Image: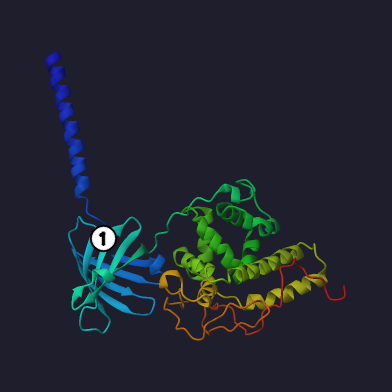
Amino acid sequence: MRRLAAGRAAMAAKLTATAVLFGLLMAVRAPAAEFTGGYDGIGDAAAMELTLQQVGTRVVGRLTTPGGGVYAINGERAGVDTGDAQGALRLSGGTSDAAFFHIEERPLGLQFLFIPSSAGKPDMASSREFSFLKRGIRPAVPAQPESRFLAAPPPGARADITVFIDQFRHWNPRDTTRLYTSLDDRSRGLILLYDHATAELMWRICEAAPSEGSREAARLAEMLERQQTDCAAYLPLVEAARESGVFPEFLRRAQFQFEIVRATALCDRGETPAAKCADVSALGAPLILRWRRASSIMADMARSGGARPGGALAPTATDEAGTAVPERDPVRYMPLAAPRAQPEDAGVSDFEPDISTRAMPVQQPMRLPLARPGS
């Protein structure tokens, strides 16, 4: 019996070792992910786009640079088990290879080495490395020190629209998202009537990255559908706008619009005299008529700041089909008291008219409703 038990134990040990070894071999032989898909440049590669298609070990595609140059990609993967590929780049309309490339796979995208050609040979000394993020993948939001934020109403609580407007900038982005979702339909709809207010709120909710399938994600999806964009495309525009030097002016405009929303809510409750409510309506109506998409607002700020660090150009606005809108005269992000020139198709809503009037002459933040002259 002892000899039989020992034999069974030895057999079990051999089977366990075989299973472990087989698992290791399968892990080693697991094929690397295909390069097929779209990629957006980040960092020094901002405003660059990369489209790849892999067929077997062959890799083809297109690289678009900020200046509008388009390179055709023709390369080969070393093998299905490797995470790199290399080959040649040819400028659109060119007859010979203009450069070479080497791609390495990364967890969220890829690293692209651009190697200029010198007398038909790779000039490694002049090569440049660019990082690309796979389209549709949102990097994790770094944890923010909780001490930066004020305590928000606890989970399950509903925020009043006036409390939300007064405090959301001081809350953690996750709390802002949760409490925006708790607002009633009328309050959310009122905010979405104002473009700068929506642009700021959408930025903060995108940064919170609500879990897929949650109520917060559903509210964000409604906002993004109205704006005809997504967080992956919008957040880089916000970052470019924040580097432009005029972002404080954007926040001031957004706050002015939030104050109009706040005053409108108080008027709806009958807590404000009718005469002052008429003033609030007169202030809000032109802003609603000039509603613009958040992407267009951020792109205007990015252009007003010129080139981004590292030599990459700020992103440009796009039309409904996703095509870049050609640059005309630079659109400056002017103070509220100055008239603002706009391209004809700079993201104006297709369901609300655009009228060319002067912006509201407000010189400093103030609580609404404003006092009537002589009152």
Residue on which disc 1 sits: 34
Locate residue 52, reporting x and y percent. Answer: 28, 68
Q: Of all residues shown, which one is farthest toward the top?
A: 1
Q: How is the image coloured?
A: rainbow
Identify which residue is drawn at 67% across, 83% down: 358
Locate residue 183, reporting x and y percent. Answer: 63, 57
Q: Is residue 185 visible?
A: yes
Locate residue 329, reporting x and y percent. Answer: 51, 86
Is 158 above or below relative to 85?
above
Is 328 above or below relative to 71?
below
- For badge 1, the amino acid type reads Glu
Mark 1 crowd level (few <14, some 14–19, many ≥20, 10 Å Cα): some
Identify which residue is drawn at 51% across, 73% down: 302
Which image quadrant is residue 101 in?
Answer: bottom left
Which image quadrant is residue 66 in?
Answer: bottom left
Identify which residue is drawn at 28% across, 69% down: 127
Between 129 and 194, which is closer to the camera in this rendering? 129
The N terminus appears in which quarter of the rendering?
top left
Locate residue 18, reporting x and y percent. Answer: 16, 35
Relative side of 129 to 367, left or right: left
Relative side of 197 to 125, left or right: right
Q: Is residue 194 visible?
A: no
Query: Dot 1 lies on which element?
Result: loop
Between 225 and 338, which is closer to the camera in this rendering? 338
Q: Of all residues shown, which one is farthest toward the front?
A: 125
The C terminus appears in which quarter of the rendering?
bottom right
